[in-house]
Each structure stands twice: as C-alpha cells, then as structure tokens.
Image (spheres, grey):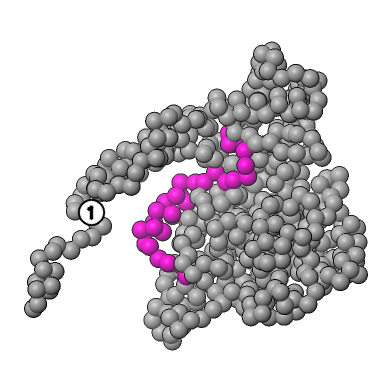
C-alpha cells in the first residue's frame, strides 16, 4: 500500500445521513405535527402579510460554511418561509389562477422525495405511476388511450410541448434535422387576443417569432371570433404563409371565457390545421357534472395543455400535455444516445419517459396527484369545480345587489371581474380600485388581482379554491365597500 492509500485509509468517509436517526425521527414527528396545524388553521391566519426587515435580511445571509443542528435549521424555516407564504392555500386567495393544494398531495411530494426516483424513465414503479396518471388525464378529457402524454412543470411547458409537436408535424420538412430556417413557407399559428402570454414565449422558443402568432379579435363574450379566424387563414394563405395551428382557449386568464371548441375543431379539420387547446384554466371542467358541457369539443383536439396543480389542487408544480398522435409526440423529442439505450431486461427495460418532452431528469410529480385521486375519487374533484363555479355566480349576485359595486359581466365559469364605483372615471377610478386591492392584501383580508376587460380596469376574483366558502365572498363584498368608502373619505383619489 502506498502513502496515498495509507492516508486515504485514515480519513473517515462522510455521508449526508444523520448521525442519530432517532433525533431526526423525533424532529420529523414535530414537523408533521406543525404541518397539520398549519393547514388546519390556515383560515385563522392573514391571507398575506408583508415581511419585516429582519426576515428579509435572513435571505441575504452568506453561504453557510459549517454545519448547524437540523432543529435550528427547521426553526429558521418556520420563522421565515412558513410564516410569510404567498397565501394560495388560504380560502380567500383569489388573486391568480392557482389551486390551493391539499395535505395528501403534500405527503405525496414528501414520499416522492424520500423514494427519490428520477422519472426520466426506466423499469421501476414510479415510472409506471407517472404513465398511469397521464392515462387518467386522458380519461378525464375523453382522449383515446392510444394518445401520448407527459407530466411537466405546469401549463406554460405543457403548451410548449403541444405547440412544438404542431410545428414539427405541419412544417413540411424535418425541423429537427434542418431547423426552422429550412421551412419553405412561414408558419402561422392563431389564437384569440385573450391568449395567455406563454404562447408568445412558445413562438419565440420555437424559433418562429412573435409575428408567427396571429391574434384574432374576440366577440362580446371575449371568445375567439370564428368568422374573423377563417378570414385570417384565407388571407395568410393568399399572402404566401402556411397556416399550421389554431389554439383554442378553454378558460381565458382575464375572464374565464371559453372558446367554441366544437366550432374550432370543425374549422381546424376543414382547413387542415393542428388543433391545440390551452386548457390550463378550464380543461378539467370536463369532469364537473354540471358544467362539463362548457368544454365540449376538447376531446377532439390534437393536443391539450392542462394543470393538475389548479383544479386537482396538487401542490406545485405539475402540468400535463396530451397529444392525440403518440408517434408524432415521441418523434418530436426522442433522442437515444448510447448511454440511454433500452435493454431487454433490468432497469433500462422500461419506457424512457424523457422521450416525450424536454427534460431528461424529471421529478416524481405523479405521486401527489395519484394519492389525492385515490383518496377522494375524481367525482369529488368534479363536484368541487362545480362548487367554485356556483360560488362565482353567488359572488356576481352579491355585487349586483350592492349599489356601490359594478360587475364587468356575468361570469362564464369561476372568474368574476368587478369594481367599486362611486362615480369616478378613468385613472381616478383605477387608482381607487387598485388601492382597495392593495389594502385587502396588506390587511390580510383577501388576495385579489386586477386586469383590463374591454379596455377598462377591473378587480379580478379567480375562485379555484376548495377551501372557499360563501361566507368568504360575503366578507369580500363587505370589506370592499368599507375600504372604498374609507379611501374616498381620505381624499386619496379624485375625479
């Protein structure tokens, strides 16, 4: 044995496992107890609150060089991160379109991390469960069992997956080999002017550019104008472009408007276009018994993006892309280097799930969805969607009954846009309502957002929350009126 080997033999080998598993077990019980209390009592806490300076400063601390007791590390997390959340698990969080998580899903995330599998693929249980959850998503939307699909980070990536397949199928060349510069005629994609911003990002990432996405005007209900769409397609063909894909929206961000998916499916078939549906907001209405008719036609799409971390209330993050043509889906992404070749037996004999998306390393997102669906059943999730839509109708009624409040339009599904209106116009009206929104947040009462509808400013309530009760909506209306009067009396805004 040489000197180097002798020296190595004297050095104790290290691990990240704890020196005393009993201590970790005790602390873990405490963490779980705290977690149960955290969600059980969420209603009793402010929706959101500003962090004090000392908490903010904690996130500027330098890189730790030496160890600290795990109990102390958890104590710091409890004091900072757990005490100042975004608030989307709270029953009065209606700001952006998010689900409100669930405890079973959180346990699923914990167990997925403990199990530790990489879902790039392979022959192991987590890979089979990932495929099973994708198959369940197909069933929820009425997609054929033969369709392709993949779990991704969220709606933006799910849309990019679908639109990438659309580009490759409609390009007329082998885009993967030759690139977009070799496409003979510039491709055109179409969607309503209410499209989510992720579609612009998709066009840019796909090398087509923002101008490849033609925004079509909407009707009075903010749905895509079918006649205007057809005219745009005809015009583009005459100008030397190649219409490739129409994007239907099953629930716009601003108002929840749902395009006529049946009409879009028919048009896409007649025109030879790929039909993609951005269903990140409303695709799962398909499982809601009282409202499923609103998304009729989604089952005819060539690809769909949906978000289990919205109306299936899975903890962030998990989205899903479904593609009717599984071969086209795999053909868009699959690469097989020598180190990822399949074997007839053993670990590498399972399906390579990374062949259906951009990530080679993939987290075990499926378990949190699987566990919650097994615990509650899909029918309960459907009823919860119906419940949120009914709550939006209830809120709209409260607003219409309040003389100081104004409703933008009757809600299509679960998004309600309204404002406090004391007789102001323009920027003064916007300033007043913005101040109401901010004080609702700062006082921990409710989290709303704001948006523009038909060129005017409105407050926006997106009810995607299994913890919301009608009493929360009663409170929102009372507090909005109170704050509106208070701000107007202060003279903070003027006409």
* Secondary structure category for the residue under label 1: loop
Residue under the point 54% across and 43% down: 100
Q: Quadrant of residue 149?
A: bottom right
Residue pictured at 46% horizontal, 67% vertical: 361
Q: Is residue 71 above or below residue 344?
A: above
Q: Quadrant of residue 116?
A: bottom left
Find residue 71 and report its horizontal and vertical position in percent: 27, 42
In front: 266, or 159? 159
In the image: residue 228, left or right of residue 87: right
Circle 1 packing at 10 Å, graded few (<14), some (14-19), many (20+), is few
Quarter holding the C terminus is top right
In the image, residue 93 lies in the stretch drawn in magenta: yes
Q: Residue 347 in the image: x percent, y percent?
A: 39, 78
The residue under the point 41% across, 72% down is: 124
Q: Is residue 415 a member of the stretch shown in magenta?
A: no
Can residue 394 be seen here? The reply is no
Picture mark count:
1
Residue 45 seen in this snapshot: yes
Q: Which residue is mark 1?
A: 18
Position of 217 with respect to 434 (left or right) is right
Determine whether, in the image, residue 457 is placed left or right of residue 64: right
Determine the residue positioned at 86% across, 71% down.
240
- In the rendered image of this protein, does residue 150 appear above or below residue 488? below
Magenta residue span: 92-120
Q: Position of residue 385 (x, y in %)?
A: 64, 47
Q: Nearer the viewer, residue 418 or 52?
A: 52
Specify the quadrant that holds the N terminus.
Answer: bottom left
Q: Position of residue 139 (x, y in %)?
A: 63, 64
User: Which residue is outermost to the top?
Assistant: 489
């Amino acid at each position: 044995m040489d000197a180097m080997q002798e020296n190595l033999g004297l050095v104790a080998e290290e691990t990240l496992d704890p020196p005393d598993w009993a201590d970790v077990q005790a602390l873990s019980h405490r963490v779980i107890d705290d977690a149960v209390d955290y969600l059980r009592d969420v209603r009793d806490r402010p929706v959101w609150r500003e962090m004090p300076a000392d908490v903010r400063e904690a996130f500027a601390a330098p890189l730790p060089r030496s160890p600290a007791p795990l109990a102390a590390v958890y104590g710091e997390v409890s004091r900072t991160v757990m005490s100042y959340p975004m608030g989307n698990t709270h029953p009065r969080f209606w700001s952006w379109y998010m689900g409100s998580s669930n405890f079973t899903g959180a346990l699923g995330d914990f167990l997925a991390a403990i199990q530790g599998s990489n879902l790039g693929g392979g022959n192991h249980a987590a890979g089979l469960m990932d495929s099973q959850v994708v198959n369940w998503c197909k069933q929820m939307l009425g997609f054929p069992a033969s369709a392709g699909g993949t779990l991704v980070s969220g709606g933006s990536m799910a849309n990019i997956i679908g639109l990438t397949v659309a580009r490759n199928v409609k390009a007329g060349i082998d885009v993967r080999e030759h690139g977009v510069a070799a496409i003979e005629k510039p491709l055109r994609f179409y969607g309503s002017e209410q499209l989510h911003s992720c579609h612009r990002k998709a066009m840019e990432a796909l090398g087509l550019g923002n101008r490849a996405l033609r925004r079509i005007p909407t009707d009075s209900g903010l749905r895509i104008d079918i006649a205007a769409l057809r005219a745009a397609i005809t015009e583009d063909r005459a100008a030397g472009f190649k219409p490739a894909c129409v994007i239907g929206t099953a629930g716009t961000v601003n108002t929840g408007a749902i395009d006529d998916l049946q009409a879009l499916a028919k048009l896409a078939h007649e025109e030879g276009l790929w039909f993609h549906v951005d269903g990140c907001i409303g695709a799962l209405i398909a499982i809601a018994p009282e409202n499923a008719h609103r998304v009729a036609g989604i089952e005819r799409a060539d690809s769909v993006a949906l978000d289990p971390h919205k109306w299936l209330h899975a903890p962030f993050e998990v989205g899903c892309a479904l593609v009717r043509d599984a071969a086209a889906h795999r053909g868009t992404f699959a690469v097989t280097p020598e180190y990822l070749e399949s074997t007839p037996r053993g670990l590498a004999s399972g399906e390579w799930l990374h062949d259906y998306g951009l990530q080679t390393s993939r987290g075990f997102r499926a378990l949190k969805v699987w566990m919650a669906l097994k615990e509650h059943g899909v029918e309960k999730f459907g009823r919860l969607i119906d419940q949120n839509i009914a709550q939006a109708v209830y809120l709209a009624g409260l607003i219409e009954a309040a003389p100081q409040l104004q409703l933008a339009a009757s809600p299509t599904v679960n998004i309600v846009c309204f404002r406090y209106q004391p007789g102001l116009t323009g920027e003064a009206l916007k300033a007043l309502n913005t101040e109401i929104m901010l004080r609702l947040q700062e006082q921990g009462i409710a989290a709303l957002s704001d948006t523009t509808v038909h060129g005017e400013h409105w407050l926006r309530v997106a009810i995607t929350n299994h913890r919301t009760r009608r009493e929360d909506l009663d409170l929102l209306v009372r507090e909005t009126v109170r704050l509106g009067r208070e701000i107007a009396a202060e003279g903070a805004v003027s006409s």
